[in-house]
Amino acid sequence: MNINLTLLLEMIVFAIFVWFTMKFVWGPIVGVLDERKASIADGLAASEKGLKDQEMAEEIAKQKIKEAKQEAAEIIAQAKSRDTQMVEEAKGKAVEEADRIIAGAQAEIDQEVNRAKDSLRTQVSELAVAGASKILGKEVDASTHKAALKDLIAQI
Amino acid sequence: MAAGTLTSTEYIRHHLSNLTYGRHPDGSWGMAHSAEEAKEMGFMAVHVDSMFWSIFLAAVFLFFFGRVAKNISAGVPGKMQNFVEWIVEFVDDNVKDSFTHKNKLVGPLALTVFAWVFLMNIMDLVPVDLIPWVLEKFGVHFQKVVPSTDPNVTFAMALSIFALMLFFSIKNKGVGGFTGELTLHPFEAKNIFVKILLIPINFFLEFVSLISKPISLALRLFGNMYAGEMIFILIALMLTAGPVIGIFGGGLQLVWAIFHILIVVLQAFIFMTLTVVYMEMAHQTDH
């Protein structure tokens, strides 16, 4: 084992070799490796974000569906209540109308009765005057017995 | 080369000799023609085979990884890009596990160390005789194709890392902090005189542990690969010892090669991990 000039020359070769490796091999390769690592990390982050977005969208969709369902139920309930209300209203109106018709009829009847009573009264007073004049045999002046006739009419 | 005309010792020695270019004792420069000649050159010599294979393997790595890095895209990676990214990410994860500071150099340093050591070690799996035998035909007499079995290579890396360690230590802790680390631990004292008294002891312990880092780093790799290569050579010797032992040797060669894959990867990994750990230690300021 001879130590000689080879040692120094090899040291120089080694130094040059290291420099070459640093400049032309290590630098570009490690740079690209880092670049790729970064892009993979970005991709993973993006996919995670996409998943999160999708989840959020699903959540929103669920919410929307829930809201819509609620609204629909409300509308149906409203419609139902309106329906019953309308029926009630109609019923009320019908009852009212009937009452009104009944009342009208009643009034007419009353009127008719009154009218009949009135005509009866006049006829009664006339009959009474005629009966009295026949009984007395002379003309009876209705105006002089106005009070008595009125009293009579009122009794009928 | 075939061992037929050589004795076993010669064969082994031959295989453990580097192709050396250097200054002969008489002052002229040239190839060494024997191990003795190479030894006589002393420091002024270069292991041509170690240099060639280490640079060649570095170039292979830079060619493939550089090509991928040039056309890289953040989109879906192709097969080659996938493979390259896998390696880079593996190294990056290891760095991130044990290195907690900010330093742009440590990642590429770890990748370089891992890739280079791995590629140099994997040359061990090329059959021991193949490349030397081919080169023999072209008149090249010595060839060690596994650069990590050359201590020059392992020490070159370890000492470079050691230099970086010292540099970052002083940069992050300051000269005072660094010398304090070397002299005020592991024995601490409140009394100033005792403190001064403890400085040489502390310095001795810390200095040994500091120096042992690059040495153990270099020798661990060298020792493992050298021993592995040695076993390949020894098994290869069996191939010349008759048909029965030869076939047995062939089987052993395969078994050892498969086991050696583990060592190849493990040593590269250990070298890389320790490099990162040493860098981490150099950046720790709260000691």
Image (cartoon, coloured by chain):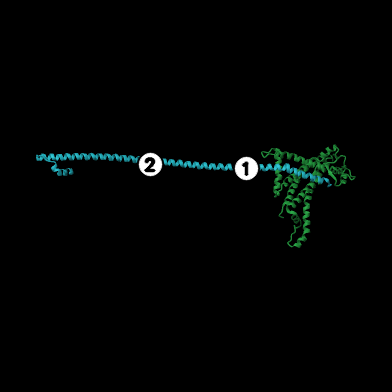
Residue at the spot x=81%, y=46% of the render? Answer: A8
Label 2 environment density (alpha carbons within 10 Å; few <14, some 14–19, many ≥20): few
Q: Nearer the viewer, residue A53 or B253?
A: A53
Residue type pointed to by label 1: Asp
According to the image, label 1 marks what residue?
A42
- Label 2 resides on the chain identified as A
Considering every residue shown, the one lying at the far right of the view is: B26
Mark 2 → mark 1, Cα distance in angstroms: 63 Å
Residue type pointed to by label 2: Gln
Number of disc labels? 2
Image coords of residue A138 (percent x, y):
9, 39
Question: Would you say B31 lies left or right of A84 here?
Answer: right
Residue at the spot x=20%, y=39% of the render? Answer: A116
Label 1 environment density (alpha carbons within 10 Å; few <14, some 14–19, many ≥20): few
- Which hue belongs to chain B? green
- Frontmost of labels 2 and 1 is 1
Residue at the spot x=75%, y=40% of the render? Answer: B62
CB-based contact (under 8 Å), mark 2 and mark 1: no
- Label 1 resides on the chain identified as A
> Quadrant of the image for the C terminus of chain B?
bottom right
The answer to which of marks 2 and 1 sits earlier in the sequence is: 1
Image coords of residue A122 (percent x, y):
17, 40
Image coords of residue B222 (percent x, y):
80, 47
Asked where in the image residue A20 lies, by quadrant, the reply is top right
Question: Would you say A48 lies left or right of B82 here?
Answer: left
Label the cyan chain with its letter.
A
Name the secondary structure under disc 1. helix
Relative to B89, does residue B174 appear above or below in the rendering?
A: below
Residue at the spot x=56%, y=42% of the render? Answer: A53
Q: Nearer the viewer, residue B15 or B239?
A: B15
Residue A125 seen anywhere in this rendered image of the structure: yes
According to the image, label 2 marks what residue?
A85
